[in-house]
Image (cartoon, coloured by chain):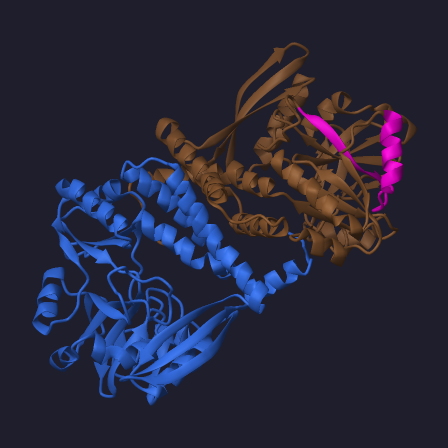
Chain colours: A blue, B brown
Amino acid sequence: MIDLEVLKEAVRKRKARSETYGDLEFLRFSDDFQDVPRGTVVFKEEVIWGYPHIGRIFMLEKGLREQFTSPFWVEEKIDGYNVRVFKNEKGVFALSRGGYICPFTTDRLADLINLRFFEDNPDLVLCMEVAGPENPYIEESPPFVHEDVAAFVFDIAFKNSRKFLPVEQKIELLERYGLPGVNVFGRFTHGDIPKIKEILLRLDREGREGIVIKEDSPSDRRAKYITRYANLNDIRITSKNMLQLPPEYYTNRILRLVLFMEEEGLKEDTELHRELGKAFLHGLFEALEEFKKDRKVSTSYRCRFRTKENALLFMEQMRRRSKHIQIIQRSLEKEGEFYLLEFEKVFMNMTGLLGHLLSGGLVFD
Amino acid sequence: MIDLEVLKEAVRKRKARSETYGDLEFLRFSDDFQDVPRGTVVFKEEVIWGYPHIGRIFMLEKGLREQFTSPFWVEEKIDGYNVRVFKNEKGVFALSRGGYICPFTTDRLADLINLRFFEDNPDLVLCMEVAGPENPYIEESPPFVHEDVAAFVFDIAFKNSRKFLPVEQKIELLERYGLPGVNVFGRFTHGDIPKIKEILLRLDREGREGIVIKEDSPSDRRAKYITRYANLNDIRITSKNMLQLPPEYYTNRILRLVLFMEEEGLKEDTELHRELGKAFLHGLFEALEEFKKDRKVSTSYRCRFRTKENALLFMEQMRRRSKHIQIIQRSLEKEGEFYLLEFEKVFMNMTGLLGHLLSGGLVFD
């Protein structure tokens, strides 16, 4: 558990905030504070620890040799959003990375995973990526999720603890309950590096994000490594809304791209130039077209809910939490067994800047 | 002149700092402070005002209509560094944009301009861009300066005043003294916008930077507008050292690029994608190659001095003022009538980061 003094100080410094969801009350760490990671959630009876930051290696071979001394597991990293799922006396809930209860994921849990897992294992937490074309948070989606959303469990954690189950025990539990897990490519040693490079080249060709490496030792050391494709795709997906992200977002990804090429012995060529240039420009030209037509820059989302209440709760949360983004509900209608929600995020910064610039405004930069 | 109280407060707040150059002593505004621009320099007898910020328009036609009501002059913007040249009882000196006396430019003034101008006009200040392949500050150079450096006067200012001479009087004085001025494309009205667009397309094709627009009225309103080429070139030139610049540098230029295309009716195409991608990637691949070979990321400069003392003074200034950049003198030798200085800037941030990443280091981002 977290020391009471730490908790009090975090509240005083506004690093932990009081939240409610229905009749659930809890404290949410909105930032890292001392050794407590952002997204940690404190209920009266129990703590769900925030999912830890995983460091990134930019070079695969050197990184594996430098960071890992024992054999390690290599798992697929999925391009979705991270949730932690747990059960308490009020039900089963999905926590976002930042420690909010996500009404969308919580609504859809029964479609995504076998909830009997929590009846038998009330002290465990499923850490999973939710991904797919109909997710309400990010525009990216893995190529193998063709509709709606799917879950990919990558870790099983304990309540009131920062520890995860070892990979083999995780795999066994996932199998026992028929839970969907991320691909586990295997348990490797430094001698297998050529094999791992092959895996990355394949993931890159197939438009997949990358890998997470977990040392098979009590230290449970971890690192992640991302494909060329994913770096380009991150740029492509966000360029329409370039002002919303810290600009390091871009320079960082370009550097990763160059080092992926270096690692895999790929040469700088016209095709790569073209892809990167297009990733930056296409979204901006789109933004410009949309602005000229509709005086706004936005992206559209759709997602399916089981209950209308959760859809409305989701919209309310989005509106309350979006900075510089206007959330506009387009439709919410029963379609088969779901409520289909369609909404739009209007990027106020880009909309405002284009408005200023296109009307001939002056900028001092 | 500047109010004594403002001066005292600026010194107290470390916005104005005491500087010396040989036996010259002065106060230098290191930041904008109240209405005093950065680079303003205060001597006992006189003030040389900092060169003002000129706002940028991102759309040519709309910008001209929005910002200018009277006829306006269109002049070429030169890709070099900005100095203000003035004479006092100790000699003729060149001030950098930030208000330092530049030993390089000061050394070469007699080669760049006709100094008799100051004998007849001791109260005037020449504001000029110095540009060329052998300048010690920036890697960019206009296509029409083939060796060494050249000066391009764009404004004539008064000592102790923020005013500039009207463009026609400036042109007349430049002609009278045979001083090199920037291209003046003409005096235009809104009706001439198609002509001005033509000028920009030509500048873009010829690899030139852009224009500065000056209203021909007592308000002397100004704005600048940059070509597609210059935006790409800024990215190309700096990508090797991407960590040194604020990342907005890049997102800003991509947006300007897109709006230049829009203004000129040019379409997004594969060639533009390729050019932008290459601008970003080529420098980084170069950085990587250099690092693998020499364990450093650097660029080389060479420039010519009239006296050895000024070359050494220049090196000392560079060393003292460079943050995160190591300055290494490679050679300083007499060559014909000049001292040829060769030096290197080693980018410590990029060098350090590549060292960390290539040895398999972890990054939490």
Q: Which residue is drawn at 42% across and 32% down?
A: B286
Q: How many marks?
A: 0
Pinpoint residue B146: horizontal percent, then vertical percent: 64, 23
- B176 inside magenta stretch: yes
Of residue A127 and residue B153, the one placed in the foreground of this image is B153
Of residue B167 and residue A64, the one placed in the foreground of this image is B167
Q: Residue at x 57, y 32 (%)?
A: B139
The outermost residue toward the right is: B120
Q: Quadrant of residue A234?
A: bottom left
Of residue B176 and residue A43, the one placed in the foreground of this image is B176
The outermost residue toward the bottom is: A23
The outermost residue toward the top is: B336
Residue range in magenta is: B149-177
- B104 inside magenta stretch: no
Q: Which residue is drawn at 14% across and 43% down?
A: A192
Pinpoint residue A296: horizontal percent, then vertical percent: 55, 68
Q: Mark yes or no: residue A155 visible.
A: yes
Q: In which quarter of the image is residue B20?
A: top right
Pinpoint residue A360: horizontal percent, then vertical percent: 69, 58
**Is residue A90 shown left or right of residue B174?**
left
Quadrant the C terminus of chain B occupies: bottom left
Q: Which residue is drawn at 45% across and 36% down?
A: B283
Of residue A325 and residue A83, the one placed in the foreground of this image is A325
Task: Note whether B122 is above or below B191 in the view shown.
Answer: above
Pinpoint residue B96: horizontal percent, then vertical percent: 70, 36
Q: Mark yes or no: residue B365 visible.
A: no
